[in-house]
Amino acid sequence: MFDYYISLGSACPIASSMSKYGLRSFSGVFDWLVTPDFSWVLHYIETDFKDFLLQENLERFDDYPLHFRDKKSNIKFMHDTESFENEYEKLREKYEQRINKFLYKSKSKICYLRSMRNKSDYEYIKDNATYIKYIIKKNNPESEIVFLCNEDLSVNKDFQFQYYRITPPEYGVDFHNGVCVPILTMLLIFCLFAEKIIPV
């Protein structure tokens, strides 16, 4: 059985559904972020978040007053109530707490969840399987990552990770081109069977 389940994105519906089914036991670093480039998520984990949320890299990208992004990684912050211009220290402190908890919990046996949105995501994951496994298991060799993909994404039989196909009508919303919306069925399987994650 896994000790914890942690979302690695790529957006907030994964963490939201984990909460709904009692799988989210603490606030993770990536829970409420939009992280389109998985390589940056891995980079931050590998470096213990040393260059995460640097103020000089933050900028606004739309008309919403509290939406901002990291211009280097293109990670988008959509749900923070603190202004990075006027309340940076408060914002930084909040994420430092999440980072410290993430690093501490990662020593346990973790099941990480990440959406695999499209062919580009799939190709990156397939081509960097060894590196991904190294990052996921660096603090505990028993930790695993499971990918969630749309039902129409083609996945070869030699894909080295467990994955679960999701069907949009189960959740009823199309979010960021189907990034990670309909995961309720998969999470229910987690609840019923603990570490039995069913690959396709």
Image (spheres, grey):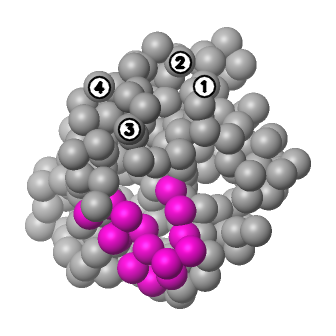
CA distance separating discs 2 and 1:
6 Å
CA distance separating discs 4 and 2:
12 Å
Which is nearer the eye, 191 or 158? 158
Q: Which comes sooner in the sequence, label 3 or label 4?
A: 4
Q: Which comes sooner in the sequence, label 3 or label 2?
A: 2
Counting from the top left corner in percent of width and height, residue 65 is at: 35, 43
Which residue was labeled with disc 4?
119
Q: Residues within 10 Å of mark 1 (few under 14, many from 20)?
A: many
Q: Which comes sooner in the sequence, label 2 or label 1?
A: 2
Are the residues flagged by discs 3 and 4 in contact, CB closer than 8 Å?
no
CA distance separating discs 4 and 1:
15 Å
Q: Residues within 10 Å of mark 2 (few under 14, many from 20)?
A: few
Name which residue lies at 61% across and 38% down. Answer: 199
Give amino acid for label 4: Lys
* Residue 45 seen from this side: yes
Mark number displayed over residue 151 = 2
Give amino acid for label 2: Glu
Give amino acid for label 3: Asp
Counting from the top left corner in percent of width and height, residue 40 is at: 24, 57
Q: Quadrant of residue 47?
A: bottom left
Q: Secondary structure at mark 2?
A: loop
Give amino acid for label 1: Ile
* 179 in relation to 199, above or below: above
* Residue 84 seen from this side: no
* 138 in relation to 68, above or below: below
Q: Nearer the viewer, mark 1 or mark 3?
A: 3
Which residue was labeled with disc 3?
158
